[in-house]
Amino acid sequence: MKTTLIILLNLAIMVAIGQDKEEQWLTKFEKSNYMQTVSYDECIAFSKKLAHKSEIVHYSEIGWSPQKRAIPMLIIDKDGYTLPEDIKKTGRLIMFIQAGIHAGEPDGTDAGFMLIRDMIIYQKHLGLLDKVSILFIPSFNVDGLARMSAYNRINQNGPEEMGWRTNSNNLNLNRDYMKADSPEMKAWLKVFHQYLPDFFIDCHTTDGADYQYVATYGIETYGNMDNELTQWLSHYYEPKLKEQMQQKGSPIFPYVSFKKWHDPRSGLVRRVGTPMISQGYTALQNRIGLLIETHMLKAYKPRVYATYNLLVMSLEMMNAEAKTLKKLHHNADLLMSSEKLGPQKLCVAYQVDYMDTTQVDFLGIEYDMQVSDLTGGEWFQYSKTPATFQIDLFENQVEETVVKLPKAYIIPVEYPEVQEIIKSHGISFFITDKKHTIEIETYKFSQQKWGQNPYEGHHSLTSFKADPIQRKTTYEAGAMVVPVRQRALKVLTYLLEPKADNSFVSWGFFNASMEQKEYSETYVMEKMARKMIAENPDLLTEFEAWKKENPQRAKSQWLQCNWFYQKSPYWDQKKDVYPVGKITDQKVLFLLGQH
Ligand SMILES: [Zn+2]
């Protein structure tokens, strides 16, 4: 009798300890009945707790935010390795999962914490670490997370409080992948090119029209990604992911925009991901990027679980295809580095072809459109009734700008901020040790138009003409020479070709070179213009023609005089000329110091 009692008591204590253990390892999301997410301090504490518990989880910090908060990263490796060279030696692939780049969309934070906890506490999904090691940033935009409030996401159904979209400088980090203004992005790029992950996942929650899907996804399969990797994504990964999510009862659909804002029936549009956002950027680095966008109107619980499932499924497919993926990445990098087999031309901007559509089934929600008696605008009123719409999908892309690749680009010493950004992308280069006067190709700009409002803190050049020119140019010592044949060929070309999506020129890095800095006095020019016409009578005919074509400008004496100034030898020959040169002759490249 006594023995039985002791056994029962012991059992009760063990159950109680077990429950404690369970309780201790619940995430805040689970403890709060799936209604809450972590604050910055809780995020760091839970990350450290996981690392403290297990040999296979390592806590690290990749850098600092503008408000000097550490950006955490967990490294999960079955042998406890943390350095990229050690992990790569084991032959394992690297999965890089990022949550909270928009801190108001923390689904990935809670999904990632549960996944790592499930691995180390419940020994669940441990097999996923056989052929893959994981880097997990539980919250990238840490200053945004610290600005927690219930009022940060007006459209979004939970959690109860969440972080803010931008960092403390009000920069959207998911527009910063190319220009890398923020310290957060500089730190991220360092991690990216050190580890060169085989798969990257960026976790978000989207605004937009209502539909049935809890989650939508974006992957790059429209031309900006290496061809073989595109085939792998569209023939293996994408269909399998869709099928498995369907089996889980949570069908997914590609992340689309609508041809007409808010109106799904107007047609769905898929685009090439711009490289200022994460998965568009990794594509230029020949690496797969998955964008997860859960839907704002769905409850927080199914959103987090959908994210969790997408992480697990992607890890499963990486394990199953580890050998293939490794080879595909190797080949993609090699192709970019090869003078003989690599591309001679590169498309650097795409546009959706609105002449070409396919019909698809889209799991929508019935809605009515009424004219608002308050604003007079179109008011979309969604019902609760699911409906399958057969609608147009516009997904064919046309090449908008294609450039011929030079042997190298040369960036003058007087643009150190441009040189620094090139470095932060892990691009190979060398620096010249003396002054060189060389023949280069470059561009002459005209018809420039700038955006009226700042965009991400920049005065962006929104449209311009760029005519190719050739000229002899002197570059002082300290110029940066960037050979094109390297694994990051696409990144460097997009940054340095003015017409490319997210080029330095389009962000306004070279605005000053387009300003007129010397002016002629009208009374000086009136006299000089007469002298110029006397020497070259054709000039007058040309001048009259210009006045006819520009009647508004011809009203200004100053602009007329400036027209003559531009034809005089006093005109600034550097104005509107792109300071970056394209070297097309291998001999010039050797002369500069490439051996
Ligand atoms: Zn987002």
Image (tube, helix red, strand yellow):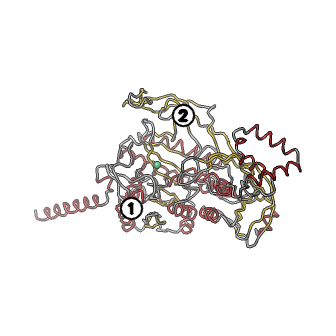
Q: Nearer the viewer, mark 2 or mark 1?
A: 2
Q: Is residue 376 visible?
A: yes
Secondary structure, mark 1, is helix
Percent position of residue 571, x then y: 77, 56
- Give the residue drawn at x 70%, y 70%: 478
- Give the residue drawn at x 48%, y 66%: 63
Secondary structure, mark 2, is strand
Write down the residue under mark 1.
120
> Which amino acid lies under the numbered mark 1 shown in the image of this protein?
Ile
Residue extending farthest to the left is 1
> Which amino acid lies under the numbered mark 2 shown in the image of this protein?
Lys
Percent position of residue 12, x then y: 19, 60
- Give the residue drawn at x 10%, y 62%: 1
Residue 567 position (above or below residue 269): below
Q: Which mark is residue 259?
A: 2
Q: Earlier in the sequence, mark 2 or mark 1?
A: 1
Q: Name the foreground residue: 413 vs 31.
A: 413
Whether residue 86 sits left or right of residue 388 in the image: it is right
Q: Are marks 2 and 1 in contact (CB under 8 Å)?
A: no
Q: Name the foreground residue: 399 vs 113.
A: 399
Q: Residues within 10 Å of mark 1 (few under 14, many from 20)?
A: some
Percent position of residue 365, x then y: 42, 31
